[in-house]
Image (cartoon, rainbow, N blue to C red):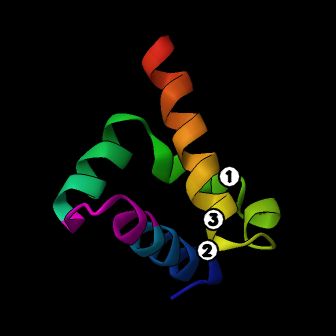
Amino acid sequence: MSRQGDFLIYCTEQYKTAKSLTGKQVSELFTRYRVWDYIYSCFEALHTTGANYIVEDIDLYIRAGQAS
């Protein structure tokens, strides 16, 4: 698997744990708000940050998507 693929899994697991969601719930949420694409496109910046930052960043991205 690619580094980006491994990172997508890492982000999914971190978000799932932080928000007490199931894998299915995270998958549906990430698909609805195109979080998969966001994480992949921001891989170079995000993979250098910590888990808390990643979860917060994903939350901000989802909120921005909900507002539009």
Numbered range of the magenta stretch: 15-23
Nearer to us in this view, 46 or 5: 46
Query: Disc 2 or disc 3, which is closer to the eye?
Result: 3
Q: Which residue is mark 1?
A: 41
Measuring from the top left, give residue 5's x and y in whole percent. Answer: 52, 76
Nearer to us in this view, 67 or 34: 67
Q: Earlier in the sequence, mark 1 or mark 3?
A: 1
Measuring from the top left, give residue 65's x and y in whole percent. Answer: 49, 24
Measuring from the top left, give residue 12's x and y in whole percent. Answer: 42, 67
Q: Which residue is mark 2?
A: 4
Residue placed at 63% from the left, 65% from the top? 52
Q: Earlier in the sequence, mark 1 or mark 2?
A: 2
Looking at the rendered structure, the kind of residue marked 3 is Asn
For residue 12, above or below residue 65: below
Residue placed at 56% from the left, 24% from the top? 64
Using the numbered discs, state the Cα–Cα distance from disc 1 to disc 2 in whole angstroms. Answer: 9 Å
Q: Which residue is mark 3?
A: 52
Using the numbered discs, state the Cα–Cα distance from disc 1 to disc 3 in whole angstroms. Answer: 19 Å
Looking at the rendered structure, the kind of residue marked 2 is Gln
Q: Secondary structure at mark 1?
A: helix
Give the dominant element type of the magenta stretch: helix, strand or loop.
helix
Q: Earlier in the sequence, mark 2 or mark 3?
A: 2
Q: Secondary structure at mark 2?
A: helix
Using the numbered discs, state the Cα–Cα distance from disc 2 to disc 3 in whole angstroms. Answer: 19 Å
Residue placed at 48% from the left, 46% from the top? 35
Residue 42 is a magenta residue: no
As drawn, the residue found furthest toward the top would be 68
Mark 2: few, some, or many residues within 10 Å (few <14, many ≥20)? Answer: some
